[in-house]
Image (cartoon, rainbow, N blue to C red):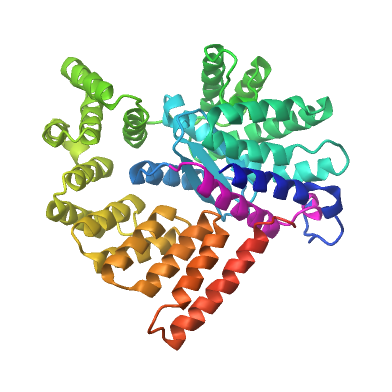
Amino acid sequence: MRFMITFLCTAILITASPAHANDELPIIEDSTSSIISLNNEHKLGQAWARVLRGSAPLLNDPITYSYLHDLLWQLTAHSQLQDKRLELIVLDNATLNAFAVPGGIVGIHGGLVLSAEKEDELSSVIAHELAHLSQRHFAAQLEESRRNKPFTLATMLASILIAAADTQAGVAALTSSLAAQQSSRLAFSRRNEQEADRIGMQTMAAAGIDPYAMPRMFSQMQRSLRFQGTRPPEFLLTHPVTESRIADSLNRASQLPPSPATPISLDFDLTRTRLKVHFSSNPQKALNHYQTSAKVTKSPLDYYGLAVAAIRMNQFKQAEKALKKLPPQWKEHLFVKLTNAELQIAAQAWITATDQLEKLASFFPGHYAVEQLLAKAYMGAERPQDTVTVLNKLIKNYPTDINAWYLLSEALGQAGNTTAVHQARVEYFLLTGQIDRALKQITFASRENGLTSSDKARLVQLEIDTKIVREEMKMDF
């Protein structure tokens, strides 16, 4: 992991050096494109994402990913983003953090969901990050760096990666990189933040979300900072929150058309409860908490938390009882039905799980969480061909999903399709930045007996594509 981080730092620093900020770079109509084109931003983001996927733990929760993915695209539809080649990466990290990387990479730490009390507050952070992308602040930083030194964006991108994998190291790296900036650079950064606030709030208003949620979220962040001591959340190191910024956001919100009252989001509440259980350091303690709380409050959300905690502790009967205590309208909610399917998968009740998920797939075709869980259920039921069919459909819509590629290679192995196993593994290695392993896998595949001319041609093309990816990962644009 440290090698990957060092590689990233070096590659981005090469990209950012004045020697590479020359007149040979593509120029399109906006001023920032004289430094880096939208297409090169996208390539840079993809290269960076490969390193991130291979270095930081990703949150393997299809329901949470589905929720955040849908929320991201709901906001994107009302944003000023021109290049909508977006990718969401959800990190298995309990810290309050989110980031946008040039090329449409939006990263969300699971802890950000826990830090928000309402969905509109979570939306405000995502809208802010989308504004960084739509206003091309990365390219603007490159333009500024050509005139003012030192250049620190490379350090910031690398620090995000370190923070995703190691919170303490990330804080140290971010702190040192910020301390190295000159006052003029900090002023430029403040202008970026102010613009992202303004554009983000416009996105929220256009999406029918209360823009006042942004200053509310800022205030919560500021309050959390008081209890952090010397270790502020990573997000606040790159997005400093001050009294003046809160006041400014309140003033901007007052100038926007009033939004209708934001309804309570059951999707958000269920997702947040799942993450509370997930990030609990003591699973038994979490189970005990929801057992006690559900008895006292009789709250459906506590019963749901009890069910999720019981599944985590393999207390399947208790989980089933908790789900049965939910109100009828809750039982019809997709996330609750999916949680019931998770229970059947955990209990290895494969027939029940596949029956439930097949019905959901007929009502929600192409839904990420439904297809992920259906693939797992088919795999457990030793139906590899069905697993392959579902995953191939899923990968068409989510081509960078490393969990899908990994499970696909396992299913192909069960089905006895050795050549396809190699190819799926190559894709997995490419998506996680393991280029040498990808090339070795191609070599192994080419040695298989019984390869057809079509198989050989595909492997030749795959090797060419892999070498292209290796060049792109140098990020020397």
Q: Quadrant of the C terminus?
A: bottom right
Instruction: Tell whether 71 sits left or right of 154.
Output: left
Where is residue 347? Give x, y as percent: 16, 44
Tell me what residue is drawn at x 15 percent, y 31 percent: 322
Magenta stretch contains residue 33: yes
Is 477 drawn above or below residue 145 in the view shown?
A: below
On the question of residue 77 being in view, the answer is no
Tell me what residue is drawn at x 24 percent, y 24 percent: 284
Quadrant position of residue 351: bottom left
On the question of residue 295 being in view, the answer is yes
Where is residue 147? Give x, y as percent: 88, 41
Q: Quadrant of the N terminus?
A: top right
Instruction: Tell whether 106 sits left or right of 308.
Output: right
Where is residue 21? Give x, y as percent: 83, 52
Is 176 drawn above or below residue 465 in the view shown?
A: above
Magenta residues (range): 31-58
Tell me what residue is drawn at x 50 percent, y 47 percent: 88
Is 241 drawn above or below residue 30 in the view shown?
A: above
Magenta stretch contains residue 141: no
Where is residue 381? Give x, y as percent: 18, 58
Query: Is the stretch drawn in magenta largely helix, strand or loop?
Result: helix
